[in-house]
Image (cartoon, rainbow, N blue to C red):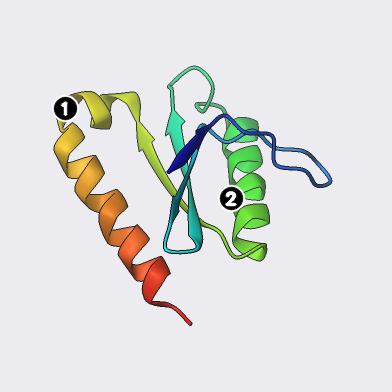
């Protein structure tokens, strides 16, 4: 199961691109376009956001649009690996 751009309540409230649920765990999936993630400040904001999710026990996986377009199958395989690893954690 997955959610598309859900609002994740907190301080601040975030809207990741996707949250994928598997075996009682969740993984945040971020698709980073060049325009929204190219400046130093944007990268700092991305790092803060990623840390915020990690502090709440959520794994985060990121891809660029170029990565997804070049090899979507590899992205899905990476996601499945992260989901299985997240599921295996106590």
Q: Residue at x 70, y 41 (%)?
A: 8
Q: Are marks 2 and 1 in contact (CB under 8 Å)?
A: no
Near mark 1 (Cα within 10 A), the count class, few <14, some 14-19 or many ≥20, is few
Q: Quadrant of the N terminus?
A: top left
Q: Residue furthest bottom?
A: 90
Q: Position of residue 15 (x, y in %)?
A: 64, 33
From mark 2 to mark 1, how far is it between C-alphas? 24 Å
Q: Residue at x 61, y 31 (%)?
A: 42
Vertical relation: 20 (above or below) 53? above
Vertical relation: 5 (above or below) 44? above
Count all numbered tags in the image, as a single digit: 2
Q: Residue furthest top?
A: 35
Q: Residue at x 21, y 23 (%)?
A: 69
Q: Position of residue 16 (x, y in %)?
A: 57, 36
Left or right of 19 on screen, residue 42: right
Q: Position of residue 21 (x, y in %)?
A: 46, 51
Element carrying mark 2: helix
Quarter of the view holding residue 12: top right
Q: Position of residue 75 (x, y in %)?
A: 24, 41
Q: From the image, tell me which residue sits under label 2.
A: 50
Q: From the image, tell me which residue sits under label 1.
A: 70
């Amino acid at each position: 199961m997955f959610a598309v751009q859900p609002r994740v309540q907190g301080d601040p409230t975030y809207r990741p691109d996707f949250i994928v649920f598997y075996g009682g765990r969740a993984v945040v999936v971020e698709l980073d376009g060049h325009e929204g993630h190219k400046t130093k400040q944007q990268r700092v904001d991305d790092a803060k956001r990623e840390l915020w999710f990690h502090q709440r026990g959520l794994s985060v996986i990121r891809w660029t649009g170029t990565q997804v377009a070049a090899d979507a199958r590899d992205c899905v395989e990476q996601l499945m690996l992260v989901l299985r690893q997240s599921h295996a954690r106590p």
